[in-house]
Image: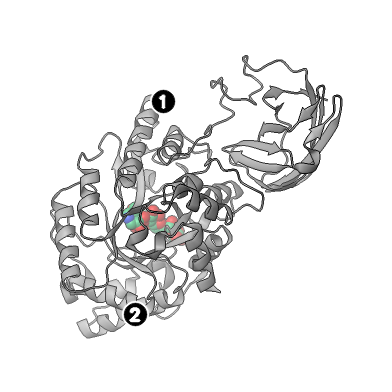
């Protein structure tokens, strides 16, 4: 069952998992059509790349998010995390401290939920992380074990965790954050016992436990060419020379606004030139808060540059954002007075950075279709440039609703004869259509387009047609509806 999950996602990801020959080589058409079969929504998508995941797939890349287990009961959060991203990384749930805070007593709940979430949404899973000096259980950190005992403990941890999820995990951060800022090796319970050798041993143990996962070393502040990334370069070169099974390097990219390393792409490229896969693993770009329009625009441009750098490096297989929204981010808790680092704001509205990332991946669509300042929004009832109602009349009825869901029936009467139609309207921010009838549905941001199906393509003058859908939002007011770009009167 688990192997079947990864196989299905591999198809959806457009051959990214099958080795170096696939990087950047899948044609846009191949990846788009494969992905369409595995869209998380049961309703049909469009050929337009109007989600991050569809756009990234056209480039043969994945786009991921850190998934916070504590937010899986928030339907707005899960709709975005499941609908926009093609890969998930456990923000905390797969760390040793989360899994085995008491020796021998495993808490698999959060990690299992993440794998199940990814399965349901046709997503890859990026495992994070097996051997890390931080978020270690106290019993490991303070156990005063002999090197032989600690060796057995680490081996058992890797065998147990990587073994349990073998077939589910596409990539593992086997080893995380082993460098000091000057590129020397970090002091830790592991380095004190084993020197640097625990890195190679951890990769070998993970390969033995899960032969199919791609194995990564991951770090922060290694984004540009600097002393720390030089240390990483030296280490991975020596691992490769020694035949250690390492497949890739993760560049966390926890960035500060205005501090894009000039050598970012060149740094990715030098690791790729070693034959390794490279991934942007934990991207966020923080600023002093509160944000303002100027800084959000600057942030959007910096996000664009990061994505473009990945696209410019053939072996850069994807970009993972460290969290969905500014509301969920780790940053304000660690850097007081800073934040606003993610693609969605505190109300889960897409920020300019979202549009920049979507566009960088070659996608389109209006990231905020209800923005009253944007005259191109077709369904904005406050937009003075929208044509006056007249040619159509619409009734939009929420026929049943509950917390986190609703059913809507829409009836449209047209003054003129139609040979094909599209009805467009906006759902509340973050809401997604989850199913429907008598129309083909697509969605860009909040804007939903319902297009005719074969049997209701032709409608006579004065005729009425209807369609309906389910969504993951509860009771809501009737939005303005446009028919073939013309705003309808309500009736
Ligand atoms: O779950 C407990 C909760 O029971 C307790 O009441 C609460 C009290 O502090 O703590 C909760 O645990 C917190 C955990 O996040 C889950 O929310 C930890 O204190 C807190 O330290 C932990 O922070 C995480 C941090 O890693 C730990 O090092 C952040 O969410 C997570 O975003 C961050 O992610 C790291 C990557 O793993 C590695 N790279 C850097 C990145 C950012 O620091």
> Relative to residue 485, is residue 342 drawn left or right?
left
Quarter holding ligand 1: bottom left
Q: From this viewpoint, is residue 79 visible?
A: yes
Q: What x and y, as percent, mark residue 467? A: 78, 40
Q: What x and y, as percent, mark residue 108? A: 49, 71
> Relative to residue 74, is residue 288 drawn left or right?
left
Q: 168 or 104: nearer the eye?
A: 168
Which structural element holds mark 2?
A: helix
Number of numbered discs on residues:
2
In the rendered image, which residue does mark 2 sit on? 208
User: At 69% across and 27% down in the image, what residue appears?
Assistant: 484
User: Nearer the viewer's eye, disc 2 or disc 1?
Assistant: 2
Q: From this viewpoint, is residue 428 visible?
A: no
Which structural element holds mark 1?
A: helix
Q: Quadrant of residue 232?
A: bottom left
- For label 2, being within 8 Å of ligand 1 is answered no
Q: 86 or 23: nearer the eye?
A: 23
User: At 79% across and 23% down in the image, what residue appears?
Assistant: 392
Mark 1 closeness class: few <14, some 14–19, many ≥20 residues within 10 Å: few
Mark 2 closeness class: few <14, some 14–19, many ≥20 residues within 10 Å: some
> Relative to residue 416, is residue 378 drawn left or right?
left
Residues at marks 2 and 1, CA–CA distance in whole angstroms: 50 Å
Asked whether the beta carbons under mark 2 and mark 1 sit within 8 Å of each other, the answer is: no
Q: Which mark is residue 293?
A: 1
> Relative to residue 450, is residue 327 drawn left or right?
left
Q: What x and y, as percent, mark residue 286? A: 34, 39
Q: What x and y, as percent, mark residue 202? A: 27, 74
């Amino acid at each position: 069952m688990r192997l079947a999950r990864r196989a299905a996602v591999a198809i959806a990801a457009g051959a990214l998992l099958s080795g170096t020959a696939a990087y950047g080589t899948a044609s846009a058409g191949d990846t788009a059509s494969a992905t369409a079969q595995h869209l998380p929504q049961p309703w049909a998508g469009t050929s337009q790349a109007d989600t991050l995941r569809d756009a990234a797939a056209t480039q043969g890349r994945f786009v991921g998010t850190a998934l916070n287990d504590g937010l899986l009961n928030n339907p707005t959060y899960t709709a975005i995390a499941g609908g926009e991203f093609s890969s998930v990384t456990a923000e905390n749930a797969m760390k040793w401290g989360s899994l085995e805070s008491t020796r021998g007593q495993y808490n698999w709940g959060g990690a299992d939920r993440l794998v199940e979430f990814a399965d349901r949404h046709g997503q890859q899973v990026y495992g994070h992380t097996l051997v890390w000096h931080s978020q270690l259980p106290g019993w490991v950190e303070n156990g005063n074990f002999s090197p032989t005992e600690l060796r057995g403990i680490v081996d058992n941890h890797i065998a147990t965790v990587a073994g349990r999820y073998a077939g589910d995990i596409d990539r593992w951060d086997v080893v995380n954050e082993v460098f000091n800022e000057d590129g020397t090796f970090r002091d830790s319970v592991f380095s004190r016992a084993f020197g640097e050798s625990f890195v190679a041993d951890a990769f070998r143990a993970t390969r033995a436990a899960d032969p199919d996962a791609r194995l990564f070393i991951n770090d922060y502040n290694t984004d540009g060419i600097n002393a720390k990334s030089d240390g990483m370069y030296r280490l991975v070169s020596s691992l490769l020379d020694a035949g250690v099974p390492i497949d890739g390097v993760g560049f966390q990219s926890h960035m500060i606004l205005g501090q894009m390393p000039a050598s970012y792409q060149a740094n990715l490229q030098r690791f790729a030139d070693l034959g390794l896969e490279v991934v942007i693993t934990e991207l966020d770009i923080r600023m002093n808060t509160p944000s303002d329009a100027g800084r959000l625009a600057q942030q959007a441009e910096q996000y664009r540059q990061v994505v473009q750098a990945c696209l410019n490096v053939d072996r850069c297989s994807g970009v993972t954002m460290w969290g969905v929204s500014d509301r969920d981010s780790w940053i304000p808790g660690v850097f007081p007075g800073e934040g606003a680092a993610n693609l969605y704001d505190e109300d889960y509205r897409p920020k300019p950075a979202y549009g920049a990332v979507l566009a960088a991946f070659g996608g389109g669509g209006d990231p905020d279709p209800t923005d009253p300042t944007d005259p191109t929004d077709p369904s904005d009832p406050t937009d003075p440039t929208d044509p006056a109602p007249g040619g159509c009349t619409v009734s939009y009825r929420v026929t049943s609703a509950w917390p986190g869901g609703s059913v809507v029936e829409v009836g449209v009467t047209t003054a003129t004869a139609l040979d094909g139609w599209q009805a467009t309207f906006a759902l509340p921010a973050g809401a997604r259509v989850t199913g429907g009838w008598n129309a083909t549905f697509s969605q860009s941001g909040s804007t939903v387009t319902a297009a005719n199906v074969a049997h209701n393509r032709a409608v006579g003058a004065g005729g009425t047609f209807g369609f309906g859908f389910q969504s993951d939002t509860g009771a809501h007011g009737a939005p303005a509806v446009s028919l073939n770009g013309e705003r309808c009167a309500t009736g």
